[in-house]
Image (cartoon, helix red, strand yellow):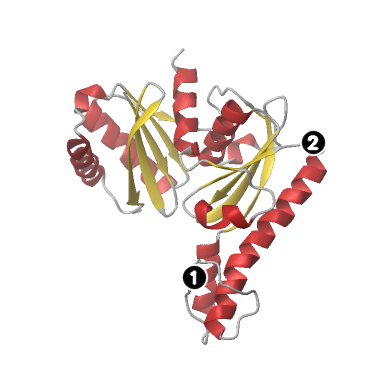
């Protein structure tokens, strides 16, 4: 079995694969102060609930955008499973080519998403990952990762606005009935929700034009994806486990 760990700025998602099958999944808050011992206890408890023996985990791969906690997770894998985790970066052998000016800067989660999207749908494809940041990642017909777009995610934008504007407050990310808000809360909800949809569709349209794509597959993933997909003109697929799937593919690619 494979343990795949996707360490994000807000949440860490762990998945257990048996071959190509994702058997179990767990989501925890990413705590930058977590120690390896705390992570050992947390993962061990999860395995117990999932009825998975530690000895069944034969390999592990880590995708992290939080360098402060990568070492703790790496140590946890060593202590709990007596194996060394594969750490995803652009320097690993990959089933796609990273064709950008600074490959070492691309986030590991973005690599995993691009690999999984291309493996499942081929090129041309655009992944929109709704998380702490909203990430756009683009793969062409040849399987070349050609770049992307990054912007603050809706929750991040809302939190920063509420922090800086004395008379504004946090609101839920939900689609309001109308664009024109007749209260401050309704106006905030409209701007947050429909503003995100507008950003996504505008950027996808520009990406398609600039990359000279014909009929790309546009895929949504990330914790907030389900809220927005039905309102977008371009998103065709929702893949909540895309990053974990990419980690599985990369792990298999590196074990040949």
Q: Residue at x 52, y 33 (%)?
A: 89
The kind of secondary structure element at disc 2 is loop
Which mark lies nearer to you, 2 or 1? 2
- Percent position (x, y) of residue 117? 58, 33
Label 1 crowd bin: few (<14), some (14–19), many (20+), radius 10 Å: few
Q: Nearer the viewer, residue 125 or 229?
A: 229
- Please report whichever mark, 2 or 1, sits nearer to the chain's N-terminal start: 1
Give the alpha-carbon distance from disc 2 to disc 1, as whole Å: 37 Å
In the figure, 228 relative to 86: above or below? Answer: below
Label 2 crowd bin: few (<14), some (14–19), many (20+), radius 10 Å: few
Q: Residue at x 38, y 46 (%)?
A: 12
**Any part of residue 245 in sight:** yes
Quarter residue 191 falls in: bottom right
**Any part of residue 90 in sight:** no
- Percent position (x, y) of residue 152? 58, 60
Q: Residue at x 47, y 32 (%)?
A: 245
Q: Which label belongs to residue 214?
A: 2
Quarter residue 187 falls in: bottom right
Left or right, 14 with reference to 245: left
Position of the N terminus, as image quadrant, is top left
Left or right, 6 with reference to 165: left
Q: Nearer the viewer, residue 129 or 75?
A: 129
Left or right, 243 with reference to 24: right
Q: Count every numbered label the image shows and give the total.
A: 2
Callout 2–callout 1 Cβ contact below 8 Å: no
Q: Nearer the viewer, residue 133 or 93?
A: 133
The kind of secondary structure element at disc 1 is helix
In the figure, 117 relative to 180: above or below? Answer: above
Q: Which label belongs to residue 159?
A: 1
């Amino acid at each position: 079995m494979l343990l795949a760990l996707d360490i994000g700025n807000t949440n860490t998602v762990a998945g257990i694969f048996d071959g190509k099958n994702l058997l179990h999944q767990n989501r925890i808050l990413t705590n930058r102060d977590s120690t390896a011992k705390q992570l050992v206890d947390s993962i061990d408890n999860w395995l117990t609930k999932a009825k998975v023996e530690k000895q069944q985990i034969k390999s592990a791969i880590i995708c992290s955008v939080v360098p402060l906690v990568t070492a703790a997770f790496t140590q946890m894998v060593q202590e709990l499973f007596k194996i060394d985790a594969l750490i995803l970066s652009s320097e690993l052998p990959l089933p796609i080519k990273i064709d950008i000016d600074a490959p070492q800067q691309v986030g590991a989660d973005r690599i995993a998403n691009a690999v999984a999207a291309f493996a499942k749908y081929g090129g041309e494809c655009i992944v929109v990952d709704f998380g702490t940041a909203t990430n756009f990642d683009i793969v062409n017909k040849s399987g070349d990762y050609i770049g992307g777009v990054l912007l603050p995610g809706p929750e991040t934008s809302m939190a920063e606005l509420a922090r800086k504007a004395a008379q504004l407050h946090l609101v839920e990310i939900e689609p309001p009935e109308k664009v024109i808000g007749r209260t401050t809360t309704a106006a905030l909800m409209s701007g947050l929700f429909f503003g995100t949809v507008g950003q996504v569709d505008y950027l996808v349209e520009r990406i398609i034009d600039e990359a000279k794509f014909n009929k790309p597959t546009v895929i949504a993933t990330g914790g907030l994806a389900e809220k927005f997909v039905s309102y977008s003109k371009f998103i065709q697929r929702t893949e909540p486990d895309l990053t974990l799937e990419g980690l599985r593919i990369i792990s298999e690619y590196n074990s040949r």
